[in-house]
Amino acid sequence: SYELTQPPSVSVSPGQTASITCSGDKLGDKYACWYQQKPGQSPVLVIYQDSKRPSGIPERFSGSNSGNTATLTISGTQAMDEADYYCQAWDSSRYVFGTGTKVTVL
Amino acid sequence: EVQLVESGGGLVQPGGSLRLSCAASGLTFSSYAMNWVRQAPGKGLEWVSGISGGGGSTYYADSVKGRFTISRDNSKNTLYLQMNSLRAEDTAVYYCAKVLVTMVRGVVKGCYLDYWGQGTLVTVSS
């Protein structure tokens, strides 16, 4: 079965750039998306179709996908961005989630 | 505004059954595929099951195939998940979610979950 791997944690200083990677076999041949989940809340879609932002998502969130790796970039990270982030791809009519990354804003 | 509200969670003994519901509003419900996703305590997201807008196509994760059944009633704007033969490892918050699709030249190339409910907790324990 298809698997997506993320680093367990990423730390970033306020105002700096955070990059979260998501690795999977030929992931670049699929479309990837990213969800943000804060404690006690439901996930929120922040990037879809590799790099598109849903309405209401700040411009500081961006995404890319090539080769075996998709990347979520948070530019000018704010304290409110501290959360768990999950990548996801669609493979053979199944939704595959990444292992999740906890972003800490120090 | 799209709203998804789950209900039906609770405490159930191993081997028991439970039916979850997800009431949808603010959208043409029958036009969208829907999914169930779960999250065990302190763990990541796990896709459980999906159903097409008309209900004619259903999909299941291997971990629940043969035990769970997804269905929908488009006249009631409601999604369901019938869970049988429940196990301790099924303990989780269950979310329903609406599907957003990317199509390229008439072919589905990507599916994402753009609206989520608040979740309902299912605890399987004796």
Image: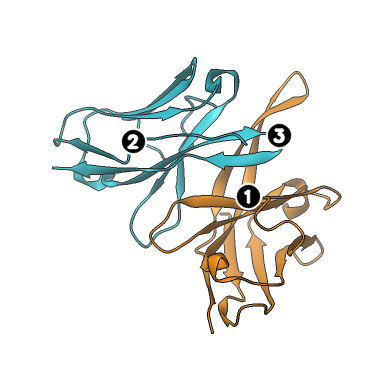
Residue A102 picture quarter: top left
| Residue at the spot of label 1 | B98
Residue contact at pointers 3 and 2, CB within 8 angstroms:
no
Give the chain of mark 1: B
Instruction: Say yes or no: labels 3 and 1 on the same chain.
Output: no
Q: Secondary structure at mark 2?
A: loop
Residue B9 drawn at (x, y percent)? 58, 75
Q: Earlier in the sequence, mark 3 or mark 2?
A: 2
Q: Is residue B121 above or below residue B16?
A: above
Camera-side residue of B49 and B85: B85
| Residue at the spot of label 3 | A92
Q: Residue at x 59, y 18 (%)?
A: A29
Q: Secondary structure at mark 3?
A: loop
Colour treatment of the image: by chain
Which amino acid, by three-letter code, is at mark 2?
Pro
Q: Which chain is cyan?
A: A
| Distance Cα–Cα, label 1 vs label 2 | 27 Å
Locate residue B97 relative to residue B45 in the image: left or right: right
Residue A81 drawn at (x, y percent)? 27, 43
Residue B86 drawn at (x, y percent)? 64, 72
Mark whose residue sits in front, 3 or 1: 3
Give the chain of mark 3: A
Camera-side residue of B105 and B25: B105
Residue B50 drawn at (x, y percent)? 70, 50
Neighbor class of circle 3 (other Cα within 10 Å; few <14, some 14-19, many 20+) is few
Q: Is residue A100 above or below residue B63?
A: above
> From this viewpoint, which residue is outermost toward the top?
A67
Q: Which quarter of the rendering shows the N terminus of chain A?
A: top right
Locate residue A100 relative to residue B60 in the image: left or right: left
Task: Please name the color used to draw chain B.
Answer: orange
Q: Is residue B74 above or below residue A72?
A: below
